[in-house]
Amino acid sequence: MLFRLFLLFTVIPLIELWLLVWVAQQTTPAFAFALVLATGFIGASLARWQGFRTVQRIQRELQQGKMPAGAMIDGLLILLAGVVLITPGVLTDCFGFLLLIPPCRAVVKRYLARAFQHRIHIRPGSFSDSAWNGASAWNAPDELLIERDEIIDSRVIDAEEPDK
């Protein structure tokens, strides 16, 4: 994790700086400056437009009684695209514009789904009296680990408080 943070905060900005200097040397410094401003403005506008569309999609899916998980992940990736697009740099702008293209965003969503699927473990159990004494369901043996793609839909039928 420390290595990834090192890359994020030191190596990537150095590459961005080198690319901006290279673009300025190949063209003019004014062109490099205008490029940074233009990509920031265009990227922020595109992110805003796609963000509104995604919010509308989330609202539509909620009205239909569906869980808008895919649309919410799209919204998160569009927000990330907007953040990297307003950051000066050629490399981050390319990454941000790629996230604003729906087929490219779908590839990133599939990658993230696979990455998180390997990190999430469901352990069966119940919240009985023993759960509050330290022997909770989270301490279940590893052989009880459930690895399946199953969604269990549940609803509360009657939520009355018990008599005291």
Image (tube, grey):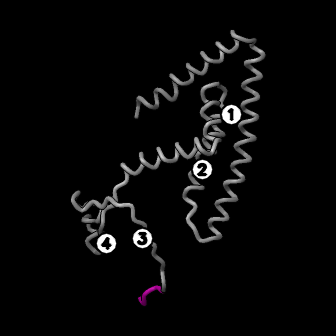
Sequence-earlier tag: 1 or 2:
2
Q: Position of residue 10 (x, y in %)?
A: 51, 23
Q: Which residue is mark 1?
A: 86
Report the magenta residues as a range.
159-164
Q: Position of residue 3 (x, y in %)?
A: 41, 29
Sequence-earlier tag: 1 or 3:
1
- Find out whether the residues at labels 1 and 3 contact each other: C-beta distance under 8 Å: no
Q: CA–CA distance between discs 1 and 3?
A: 41 Å
Q: Residue at x 68, y 33 (%)?
A: 86
Q: Secondary structure at mark 2?
A: helix
- Furthest toward the front, the residue is 103
The rendered magenta stretch, by its main secondary structure, is classed as: loop
Residue 163 forms part of the magenta stretch:
yes
- Furthest toward the bottom, the residue is 163
Q: Which residue is mark 4?
A: 126
- Give the class, few, some or many, for how many residues have Cα within 10 Å of label 1's Cα (few <14, many ≥20): many
Sequence-earlier tag: 4 or 3:
4
